[in-house]
Image (cartoon, grey):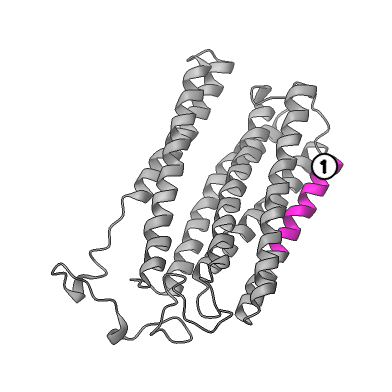
């Protein structure tokens, strides 16, 4: 970027692509080993989404077994914890493999089977399905609110820490937006500075959540097994925190690749997709604070 050289960056912004990221037929990557050009799109297969989905299923099932074991003594809670741990590991392996195959490997090779628009559209579809994941837990919380409220003595949820955490996360969304804008205008130093600031803010938010959990669990005795509201609260905040953790890891990868000069005004696919994900996580947090934290005080 800074020296004017074309550096292999995102999988769709390579030499031979026009301003919109589309490629001419003559620019499509050629394959050795006897592959035919008309099979390029159809031969692209990946097992990693299935691995990630299996891991997510194990993670959620483990939490369910833990709750059933703690409340109804259906199974030992340790079984649920073990299942959730294995599921989390498998999920992370699946996501890492998926990231390597879909983004990092094509970026190193400087070739791609898909356009920038395809990656962005796929990210939007993923986020649309992710709404249902959060929606299921929110429905559980709304079901609780229909009954007697509060279900038990609750600790003070809406605190200054929550407000500070909200400000930190919203600020990170702003810095990431302007980092992307700086990249579009070729302002490398500003891009790097704002991207690094976003990473720091994301880590600070996670630190705030860890401290909040410490306050609730250690000082207040409010845990995942503290009744139906406890399961809803830690289920929603934990699910969101997991998404933020994945987002922080993705932004860290963006920072690493940005320092290597992998991004430019026409090489921003990874920045665009991660930005969509991060803004989605921020929007979910706002809704969560209003409904869960604020709603618990009503």
Confirm whether residue 152 shows in the render: no
| Left or right: 60, with 205 as reference point | left
| Residue range of the region highlighted in magenta in the rendering | 159-174
Query: Relative to residue 104, is residue 14 depicted above or below?
Result: below
Name the image quarter holding the C terminus.
top right
Q: Position of residue 281 (x, y in %)?
A: 63, 54
Q: Which residue is mark 1?
A: 161
Mark 1, other Cα within 10 Å: few <14 / some 14–19 / many ≥20: some
Q: Extreme front residue here?
A: 3
- Res 157 → quadrant: top right
Q: Relative to the observer, which residue lies in front, 294 or 235?
A: 235
Queried whether the magenta region covers residue 37, the answer comes back as: no
Q: What secondary structure predominates along the stretch shown in magenta?
A: helix
Queried whether the magenta region covers residue 163, the answer comes back as: yes
Query: Relative to residue 170, is residue 113 depicted above or below?
Result: below
Confirm whether residue 230 shows in the render: yes
Q: Position of residue 123 (x, y in %)?
A: 49, 62
Name the image quarter holding the N terminus.
bottom right
Q: Position of residue 151 (x, y in %)?
A: 74, 25
How many marks on residues? 1
Q: At 74% from the left edge and 58% from the top edge, which residue is drawn?
A: 170
- Res 218 → quadrant: top right
Q: Relative to the observer, which residue lies in front, 16 or 135?
A: 16
Query: Relative to residue 238, is residue 199 depicted above or below?
Result: below
């Amino acid at each position: 970027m800074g020296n004017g050289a074309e550096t292999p960056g995102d999988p769709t912004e390579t030499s031979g692509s026009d301003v919109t990221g589309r490629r001419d037929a003559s620019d499509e990557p050629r394959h050795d080993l006897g592959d035919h050009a008309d099979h390029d799109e159809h031969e692209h297969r990946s097992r990693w989404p299935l691995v990630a989905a299996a891991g997510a299923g194990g993670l959620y099932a483990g939490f369910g077994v833990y709750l059933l074991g703690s409340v109804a003594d259906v199974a030992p809670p340790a079984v649920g914890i073990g299942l959730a741990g294995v599921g989390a590991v498998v999920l992370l392996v699946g996501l890492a493999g998926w990231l390597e195959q879909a983004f990092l490997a094509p970026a190193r090779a400087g070739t791609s089977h898909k356009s920038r628009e395809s990656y962005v559209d796929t990210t939007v579809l993923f986020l649309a399905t992710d709404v249902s994941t959060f929606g299921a837990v929110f429905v559980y919380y709304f079901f609780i609110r229909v009954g007697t409220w509060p279900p038990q003595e609750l600790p003070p949820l809406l605190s200054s820490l929550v407000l500070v955490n909200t400000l930190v996360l919203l600020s990170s969304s702003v810095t990431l937006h302007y980092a992307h804008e700086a990249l579009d205008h070729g302002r490398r130093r500003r891009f790097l500075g704002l991207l690094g600031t976003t990473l720091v803010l994301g880590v600070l938010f996670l630190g705030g959540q860890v401290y909040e959990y410490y306050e609730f669990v250690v000082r207040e005795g409010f845990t995942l097994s503290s009744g139906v509201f406890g399961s809803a609260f830690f289920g929603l905040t934990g699910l969101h925190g997991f998404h933020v953790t994945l987002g922080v890891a993705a932004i860290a990868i963006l920072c690493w690749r940005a320092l290597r000069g992998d991004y430019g005004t026409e090489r921003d696919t990874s920045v665009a997709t991660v930005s969509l994900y991060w803004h989605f996580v921020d929007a979910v947090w706002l809704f969560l604070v209003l409904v869960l934290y604020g709603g618990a005080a009503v």
